[in-house]
Image (cartoon, rainbow, N blue to C red):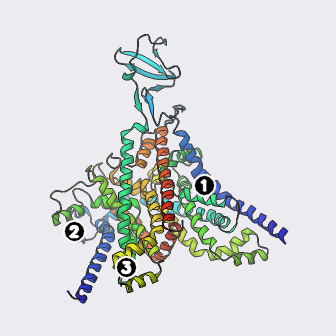
Amino acid sequence: MDYKTRKRLLTVAFYVMVAFIVIYTVFPFYWAVVSSLKAGAALFRVEFVPPDPAWDNYVSVFREQPFARNILNSVIVAFVTVILSLFLAVTAAYALGRVYFRGRGVLLFVVLGVSMFPQVAVLSGLYETIRFLGLYNSLWALILSYLIFTLPFTVWVLTTFMRELPKELEEAAIVDGASPWQTIVSVFMPLMGPALATTGLLAFIAAWNEFLFALTFTLTNDMRTVPVAIALISGASQFELPWGNIMAASVIVTVPLIVLVLIFQRKIVSGLTAGAVKG
Amino acid sequence: MTVRASKLTRQRVRAAWVFLAPMLIVLALVAGWPLLSTFSYSFTDKTLTADSETRFVGVSNYVFYGPNLNDWDDELDGYFIVYEPDDALLVYRPDTDTFYDLDTDQPYADNVDRSQIFEWQGLLVDGLWWKSVWNTTAFAVISVALELILGMAVALILNANMPGRSVMRAAVLIPWAIPTIVSAQMWGWMLNDQYGVINEVFLGLGFIEDRLAYTANPLLALPSVIAVDVWKTTPFMSLLILAALQLLPGECYEAARVDGVHPIKVFVKITLPLIRPALMVAVIFRSLDALRIFDLIYVLTSNTRDTMSMSVYARQQLVDFQNVGYGSAASTTLFLIITSFTVVYIALGRVNFGGER
């Protein structure tokens, strides 16, 4: 075999591998889309392209349970969680990233520790706290409990970001007599747009996907978030799961996420690596 | 000038604490206080039923030798016991370590054979708990190892200079973007024993002779969970590895190529040592995630013994059985296991890291 054929064979093998990886990663979602478009008995036949696509499953998923309400709940919870954690994290990140004081290292370590928490470890204590505050089976219970993972993450990433900003910017503000709060608002905030967008997006996805707290701290159908609703969709009989509805619901909540992730892919990758590699 | 500087510093430090306060208060409320309460509940017999009184039981939730803990009766101030050899109704009071006759409330005259009544109980002698510890460990070790190998392969391909790289990067991000619950349901449908596409394809290819119930079969349930987790989280791994690969200096590779070093040797001798720190961080993040796994297992295989993880076990005790004290003991043990794993990993990781330099 001469050098040229060998090289060509290697290229072919390489692209076969690439094709295999792309099919492996994309096929399960493709199959969910295909299944969601099959009505009635067509669902139970394995056909890789639906012969006559139908929207029946999409209609019935909204008719048979308060799925629109579940989506609204998820949007509210994720948005409020992100806004609260960004607000709390920006000021904290300024303190941790720009000011030298005793105990700073310990605080950063605690923040990192909390972000790695197994959530079950706080489940019973948090349940009692939430009942004590009268928040059981409300969206506030979820917003409050989600701060346990979104807040440390945003604080950590924004602190690393703040630390890298040039010192001169802040000194100029101090010479002009600006207070620390004014410095944050007028000097740092304008520079932090991209960092806020990235961390906000990642925190949003984390809050949107959360399951354990949402399952435990809500009781009624109309307080459930999307992941709990999808996990608990049940059919007419106990033994017959409405797979068509489940697939339709899955596609509905996943398409916006995939679009977001594909639009922001570069930012997401840099945000993830800032959170992980530097951590 | 120094006076002004120190005044400025003091002002800044004061402002820093004011800025930190809201975050610290929130973290204390949602993390610190609940964690401490969980610890303290684990030493009580607290339940979710409103009318029962909570009592301190020491380490009984962890390990206890005595009458069945569920037979405790607040009114009797002891354990209610049906002593079968004598057909007698007795009360056992641990503070005096004596058996009393239920009717007369006098110490029971006959000798009581304690081995008939007493048994070892508690989390640390519960077979199901150790089964779930084993499941979680097996799941974490196998899935993180597979994700590391596959993630490395995908990252090396993404790092190669080839046309269509952006398409592949986008494709790889899709599993990461899909919520865990959704991926569990999607795979649950694909793995369905009667109508699942996987059985259909495997039958067509001649891999299997009969349709398999992947999520219900005791031998296949855990491997199925691992397969779905690998599919879902390999992208995360490969993106972290890719980020590390892209920071590598080109000169070493140039030199190796000029010297005609075999690509595999280049990978082992140059690439691996250079990206080792990033791999260590990626592995600890994924391992901590894997050790607390809940949602995927809960949805894909529900509460079966074959795949039960520590988190599923603890939540079942806490919520389904309303056994807050016992469930908190499981939560606390899980927390201690994960914390000690982290400490050992970081300590060992650092030792190796220092040895290399």
What is the quadrant of residue A12 in the picture? bottom left
- Determine the CA span between mark 2 and mark 1: 51 Å
Q: Residues within 10 Å of mark 3 (few under 14, many from 20)?
A: few
| Residue identifier under label 2 | A47
| Type of amino acid under label 3 | Val
Q: Residue under mark 2: which chain is it in?
A: A
Q: Residue under mark 1: which chain is it in?
A: B
Give the number of callouts: 3
User: Which of the two discs, 1 and 3, labels the residue nearer the N terminus?
Assistant: 1
Which quadrant, please, contains the N terminus of chain B? bottom right
| Type of amino acid under label 2 | Glu
Q: In this view, does A67 lie above or below B315?
A: below
Q: Which mark is residue B27?
A: 1
Q: Which residue lies at the image location 63% right of the left edge and 77% below the top edge?
A: A191
* Image coords of residue B29 (percent x, y): 61, 51
| Residue identifier under label 3 | B167
Q: Which of A62 and A27 is in front in this view?
A: A27
What is the quadrant of residue B209 in the picture? bottom left
Residue contact at pointers 1 and 3, CB within 8 angstroms: no
Q: Is mark 3 on a helix, strand or loop?
A: helix
What is the quadrant of residue A86 in the picture? bottom right
